[in-house]
Amino acid sequence: MEIKMTTDLTNQVYLDALSIRYTVFVDEQQVPKALEVDEDEAAAIHFVLYEEDQPLATLRLLPLSHSQVKLQRMAVQQDARQKSLGKQLILFAENYANEQGYQTITLGAQQTAIPFYEKIGYQPQGEPFMDAGIPHITMHKTI
C-alpha cells in the first residue's frame, strides 16, 4: 500500500482521484458530474491510496481556517471496499493535517457512512441535510 498526495491539478495523482470519484459518485450514486468537480479543487490537498499501483481510494482535505480542515470526496472503489482502505487513508490524512497544525476535521457524511466515521472517532453534529440528492450529516473530530 502507498498513499500519495498532491495539490497539482495536472498531476497523475489528482487524475487518479478524479477517476475514483467519477466511478463512485457519478456512476454508482448518480451525482451529477457538474457537481463533482467544484471551485475548491485547487485549494484542496488530494490523497490517493494505491495497492500494486492501482488507485483504490481517495479523499481531499480543504483548509477552512488555520486550525480546521474539511475532509471531502472520500471514495473507495467498489471491489476494494471492506478492506479497511478508507480507514487507513483517513488516518493518514488526519496525521498529515495534525502535522500541519490543524486541530479539528469536519466532514459531511452520507447517512449510510455514519457508523464508519463514528468507529474512527467522528461525532455527528446538527441536523441532517441533503447534498447532491443524498442525505448527509455534519461530523467533527478533534485530532
Image (cartoon, helix red, strand yellow):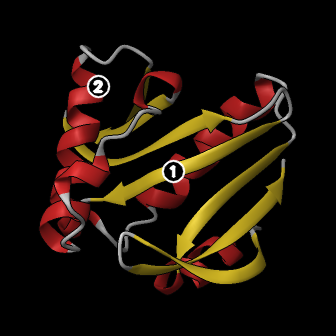
Q: In this view, does 127 lie to the left or right of 19?
A: right
Which residue is at a point 52% across and 84% down the rendered structure image?
Answer: 111
Residue placed under numbered mark 1 in the picture: 72
Which of the pair 77/53 is nearer the observer?
77
The 10 Å Cα crowd at callout 2, few under 14, some 14 to 19, many 20 or more, is many
Q: Percent position (x, y) of residue 66?
A: 84, 26
Q: Is residue 68 above or below residue 128?
A: above
Q: Is residue 128 above or below residue 77?
A: below
Q: Is residue 7 left or right of residue 136?
A: left
The picture quadrant where one finds residue 127 is bottom right
Check disc 2 and give the amino acid type: Val
Mark sitting earlier along the chain (1/2): 2
Q: Percent position (x, y) of residue 129?
A: 58, 79
> Regarding mark 1 in the picture, which secondary structure is present there?
strand
Q: Percent position (x, y) of residue 25?
A: 26, 63
Residue placed under numbered mark 2 in the picture: 13
The picture quadrant where one finds residue 78 is bottom left
Which residue is at a point 36% across and 69% down the rendered structure image?
Answer: 132
Q: Is residue 99 left or right of residue 62?
A: right
Residue 1 in sight in this render: no
Q: Residue 54 carries which label?
A: none
> Regarding mark 2 in the picture, which secondary structure is present there?
helix
Check disc 1 and give the amino acid type: Gln
